[in-house]
């Protein structure tokens, strides 16, 4: 007797469920994506006990006839791929035909569906077995209830996280779907309490406002760009509202919300010097391209994607984001905190993924409170930041700041007729020196100076060999270096942008950067790394006294920078307090 047997459909579906149905959010994802593919304009997701007891998805889509409703639970049954070539022109979210049979094999399913002018169908399936198929009410659309998930595979239950974590993951995914389809109204409830609601207005910024609230939506920057391969549209946040993880980078490719490490890296690179490396932006970007340039069939959950021209996309993302940031006024404003009494009157929605800290902290309560503010005000803020007078830092140059004092030996206090400003003297001079050094590094002509007393640098054997291998890089920077005994180099000449008195320390640091070998694959990033490191060494420190005259010179140099808002490490150089904000803090105004 043959040892190899063809497994039953029931067993195959349970195995497939291990790939497709990992957690509650996996089920919600598959069901809601089916509703989107059915051209729904309103989708309601109701959960009980975070979905562990019941998941109900109701839509107003095209529905199914009785035959299709039953066939949808057959393995590899799909209406989205009719021939092999269709696999290269996928324009729907679902196409594998695995999700529904996989879900049905490990749960109790109750389906009611009806097409326009058709007959309603009611189907009940337990553990993959059809229990009931009958005529139902004729409400156009589909309602799918999934009860007791993994009831017949108890080993899978232990892999579910806590109810709070499962609900957080569902919430995060619904938010991303809402951002992916601003023309669809989404509602998410848990135990009859509404958590997410979007209006389906078709306005992406309004959807961002409905999900994140005023404090985020009013600090977004609109992005529009395209090349021969890709069209890009969406919003990126100003560096004043960064997050501690990548979970708020939402990328939508041809209507599909995906995660791709190359795309995330390109977005992050667009913020280079505008933010610290450990912080990440809030981004919602719609990427449209020819379906033949992407492959969505690389993962059962369809959450990753391959691009055949990824370099073209990366360049478009990095350049357009960097350009938009440089053209926008990025001086952070200090928010006046909500009075303590208000906190107790506001309930917190659940809006965070598993990896992010999840608590009802005052900071997050403030964000929720801001959601009550007008979307029109937020949109006005975004539009205002795009007006011509804000372009290329012209507004900063017209501020005509003048210093009035220095506090704690670190912060310059400046003002004009409308606002008060605080400038971090070290961060500001870092930015000035960074751009000066970077300009010198990128210049066709290198200016150098000879040393009366050469600098001697002694290294380990491995370090010596690495420097020898990369000697051409040092020569291009303007260094005249030769070997000097065992594992030792002598520096006889160096570029003029090294700060006087710090030559030896600077040369050692440049050697270290080359030895680390982390950024040499990209010459531009190597130059940026050198410039940022040298700028820090060359700049006035915190608690280092400077005069008001020196402060004035620093401000005059700062506003001439390409990016006067951040030091090369992404920290802000300047923050502002408007007269109104100051008067609120001192209770001169109470509204």
Image: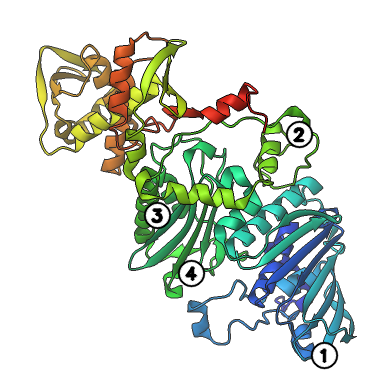
For disc 3, the marked residue is 317
As drawn, the label of residue 119 is 1
Picture quadrant of residue 293: bottom left
Image quadrant holding the N terminus, namely bottom right
Q: Nearer the viewer, mark 2 or mark 3?
A: 2
Closer-to-camera residue (553/104): 553
| Element class at badge 1 | loop
Sequence-first tag of 1 and 4: 1
- Residue at x-position 41% and y-position 40%: 329
Left or right placement of residue 476 versus residue 127 in this view: left
Closer-to-camera residue (324/148): 324
Sequence-first tag of 3 and 1: 1
Residue 118 sits above or below residue 155 on the image? below
| Element class at badge 4 | strand
| Element class at badge 2 | helix
Report, in whole angstroms, how far the alpha carbon at label 3 lies from the one at label 1: 48 Å
Task: Give the image's coloring scheme.
Answer: rainbow
Sequence-first tag of 2 and 4: 4
Q: Position of residue 272 (x, y in %)?
A: 39, 40
For disc 2, the marked residue is 343
Report, in whole angstroms, how far the alpha carbon at label 1 lies from the one at label 4: 38 Å
- Mark 1 surroundings within 10 Å by alpha-carbon count, few (fewer than 14), some (14 through 19), many (20 or more): some
Report, in whole angstroms, how far the alpha carbon at label 2 lies from the one at label 3: 39 Å
- Mark 2 surroundings within 10 Å by alpha-carbon count, few (fewer than 14), some (14 through 19), many (20 or more): some
- Mark 3 surroundings within 10 Å by alpha-carbon count, few (fewer than 14), some (14 through 19), many (20 or more): many
Closer-to-camera residue (188/107): 188
Residue 133 sits above or below residue 535 on the image? below
């Amino acid at each position: 007797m043959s040892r190899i047997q063809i497994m039953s459909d029931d067993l195959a579906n349970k195995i497939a469920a291990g790939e497709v149905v990992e957690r509650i959010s996996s089920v919600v994802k598959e069901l809601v994506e089916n509703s989107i593919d059915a051209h729904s304009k309103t989708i309601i997701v109701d959960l009980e006990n975070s979905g562990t007891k019941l998941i109900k998805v109701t839509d107003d889509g095209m529905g199914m006839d009785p035959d299709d409703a039953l066939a949808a639970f057959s393995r590899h049954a799909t209406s989205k791929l009719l021939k092999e070539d269709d696999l290269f022109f996928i324009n729907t979210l679902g196409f594998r035909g695995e999700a529904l049979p996989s879900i049905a094999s490990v749960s109790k399913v109750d389906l009611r569906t009806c097409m326009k002018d058709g007959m309603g169908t009611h189907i009940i399936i337990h553990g993959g077995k059809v229990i009931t198929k009958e005529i139902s009410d004729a409400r156009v659309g589909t309602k799918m209830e999934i009860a007791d998930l993994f009831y017949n595979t108890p080993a899978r239950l232990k892999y579910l996280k806590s109810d709070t974590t499962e609900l957080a993951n569902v919430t995060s995914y619904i938010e991303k779907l809402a951002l992916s389809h601003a023309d669809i109204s989404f509602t998410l409830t848990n135990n009859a309490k509404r958590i997410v609601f979007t209006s389906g207005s078709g306005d992406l910024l309004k959807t961002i406002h409905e999900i994140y609230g005023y404090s985020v939506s009013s600090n977004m920057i609109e992005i529009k760009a395209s090349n021969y391969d890709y069209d890009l549209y969406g919003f990126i946040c100003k560096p004043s509202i960064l997050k501690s993880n990548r979970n708020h980078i939402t990328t939508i490719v041809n209507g599909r919300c995906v995660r791709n490490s190359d795309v995330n890296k390109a977005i992050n690179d667009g913020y280079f010097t505008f933010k610290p490396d450990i912080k990440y932006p809030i981004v919602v970007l719609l990427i449209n391209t020819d379906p033949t340039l992407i492959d969505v069939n690389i993962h059962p959950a369809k959450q990753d994607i391959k691009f055949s021209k990824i370099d073209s996309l990366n360049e478009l993302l990095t350049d357009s984001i960097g350009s938009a940031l440089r053209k926008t006024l990025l001086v952070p404003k200090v928010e006046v905190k909500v009075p303590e009494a208000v906190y107790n009157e506001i309930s917190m929605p659940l809006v965070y993924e598993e990896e992010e800290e999840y608590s009802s902290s005052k900071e997050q309560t403030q964000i929720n409170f801001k959601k009550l503010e007008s979307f029109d005000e937020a949109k006005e803020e975004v539009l205002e930041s795009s007006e011509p007078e804000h372009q290329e830092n012209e507004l900063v140059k017209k501020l005509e700041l003048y210093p009035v004092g220095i506090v704690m030996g670190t912060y310059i206090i400046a003002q004009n007729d409308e606002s008060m400003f605080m400038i971090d003297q070290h961060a500001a001079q870092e930015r000035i020196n960074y751009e000066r050094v970077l300009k010198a590094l990128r210049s066709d002509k290198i200016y150098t100076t000879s040393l009366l007393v050469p600098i001697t640098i002694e290294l380990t054997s491995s370090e010596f060999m690495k420097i020898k291998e990369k000697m051409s890089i040092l020569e291009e920077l303007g260094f005249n270096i030769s070997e000097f005994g065992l594992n030792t180099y002598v520096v006889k000449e160096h570029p003029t942008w090294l700060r006087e008195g710090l030559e030896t320390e600077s040369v050692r640091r440049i050697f270290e950067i080359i030895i680390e070998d982390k950024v040499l694959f990209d010459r531009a990033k190597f130059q940026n790394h050198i410039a940022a490191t040298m700028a820090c060494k060359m700049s006035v420190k915190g608690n280092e006294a400077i005069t008001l005259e020196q402060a004035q010179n620093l401000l005059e140099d700062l506003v001439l920078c390409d990016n006067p808002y951040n030091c090369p490490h992404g920290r802000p150089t300047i923050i502002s307090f408007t007269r109104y904000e100051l008067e609120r803090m001192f209770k001169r105004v109470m509204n």
